Each structure stands twice: as structure tokens, then as C-alpha cells.
Amino acid sequence: MKASLISVLSSFSLALATDSAKLLPWSPPGHGDVRGPCPMLNTLANHGLLPHNGKDISEEDIVDVLGNTLNVAESLAVALYKEAMTTVEDPNATTFSLSDLDRPGILEHDASLSRQDPYFGNDHEFNQKIFDQTKSYWTSPLIDIEEAAEAHEARWNTSKATNPDFNISETGTAFSFGESAAYMLAFEEDGIGYANRSWVVYFFENERLPQELGWTKRPFVTTGEILFNLTQRIVNSTVGVTPEVIAKLKDFAKVNPSFAGSS
């Protein structure tokens, strides 16, 4: 019954959303444009919501675009901007480029859901083979917490087993789990803790918002507390999570209270 209802609603929303006049413009990166390891920021640049060249992205850009497009709370958007700025080499800079995010050992991390590790080469472009492993764990039309946790853990274990230089910092660990929570929120359907699989796959494989499939901005505001709580649910559902990982996440939360809904 639930699956059939989802099918009917999805078909209805698809019919509404495919009006081309309502679709955001989109074009892939061109000559001189830069992209980074974050699929969502790449996507927002491809749509021209962030600068299409991927350069000189300001705090105002991040707050406006994340708020208007994904309903991200201003406080969380500011916190994400500040984390992005840690990857910029110029200490006096007030903007960042998407390529800055690829600096190793800061936000960029091993065990990505859709990129190979730096040890193996290009770690900022989408890798279909890597993503095929990830999405193989999403076996239902709606991805739930357990499937998100299983996919994340599979990528973590594969990376750890095959990459002799495997290493993830406290921030990288937090962002690794948080990225799973982020796609669950951005493409939520049928309540927090469920994401529309077709939307998520389309997003990752095309670096494009899945409007053609019926996606629209979620009606609720995503705060740091909501993101933190969903991240914690994914951590709690991860069978092989180690005390070391838990310690890294706790240390990150202490240093970055904005991500836990407090400041």
C-alpha cells in the first residue's frame, strides 16, 4: 500500500514539475570553471545559483543560496561557510573556490560516497564505480536510516581495506557521516529519515537538482540541530562504528557547537 501510494504521488508531482518553464537553468562546467569534492556545491554552481565558474564564493552567496534553494538555516549556512574557509590558503581571504575544498586533510576525506580516495588519483570528480557500490545498498524506493548507514559503512570499510594511506581527521569524520545526513534531508520524502532514492541517485550522477523527477525544496528549515540529530541516528545505526570514530565525532561537536544546534 505504501509503495503504491508513493508511486501515485511521485507520478503526480512529476507531471507538475516537468513544466520546463519552472526548471532551473543548468549547464556543466566549462573552460576555466572549477569544481570540488562536494556534489551539492558543484550542483548549485552548475545551476548558476552559486557562481558558475566555482570561484570567489562569499558568505552571502552561501547563506542566500542554501537558504533559498534547500531551506538551510542561516546559522548552519554560516557554519558551513566558515568550514569551507579553512581550506583557503590566504588567511585574509573572504571568499573560497570549489577547488579549495579539495585540499587534503581538511574537509576532503577518504571513503567518499561518490569519489575515489586521493591515494588512487582524481578525488574531486564523480566516480561511477565508487557510487555503484554506494547505491547498491539503497534497495528500497525510499532510502532509510539503516540503508544510509550500510552504504556509508561499506564505503568506509572498502576504503580502509584498499587504501594503504587511509586516514580521516576529526572534521573529515564528522563531514563523512554528515554528508549522508545531508542528502537524506535535502531529498527527504515521507518524513525525516527517509529520502527518495531516485532523487538522490539523479543528484549524485548528474550534479543537478532532480526537479525533472518532481523534487522541490523541502518545506522545513534544516538547522544545525536537525542535521546533527540525523547524523547521530546514522552513526547509531552503523554496526561497525568504533570508539575511535565516536571520539572524533564528539571532539568535533565540542569545537563546532553550531553543528549541534547551539553556539
Image (cartoon, rainbow, N blue to C red):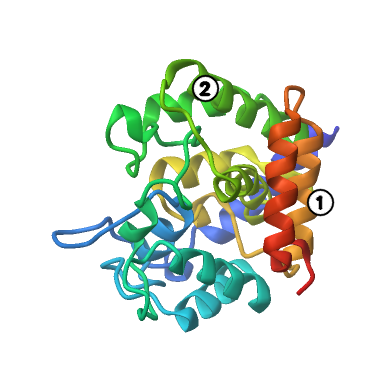
- In the image, residue 151 sits, relative to residue 216, either above or below, namely above
Residue occupying image coordinates x 36% and y 33%: 127
x then y, percent, for residue 128: 38, 29
Mark 2: which amino acid? Lys
- In the image, residue 70 sits, relative to residue 7, either above or below, namely below
x then y, percent, for residue 250: 75, 49
Mark 1: which amino acid? Gly
Label tally:
2
Q: Is residue 193 left or right of residue 111?
A: right
**Residue corresponding to mark 2:** 160
The residue furthest top is 161
Residue 191: give its label.
Answer: 1
The tag earlier along the polypeptide, 2 or 1, is 2
Viewer-proximal residue among 255 and 61: 255
Element marked by disc 1? loop
Residue occupying image coordinates x 79% and y 63%: 225
The residue furthest bottom is 60
Circle 1 crowding by C-alpha within 10 Å: few under 14, some 14–19, many from 20: few
Q: Quadrant of the N terminus?
A: top right
Dots 2 and 1: beta carbons under 8 Å? no
**Is residue 14 at least partly visible in the picture?**
yes
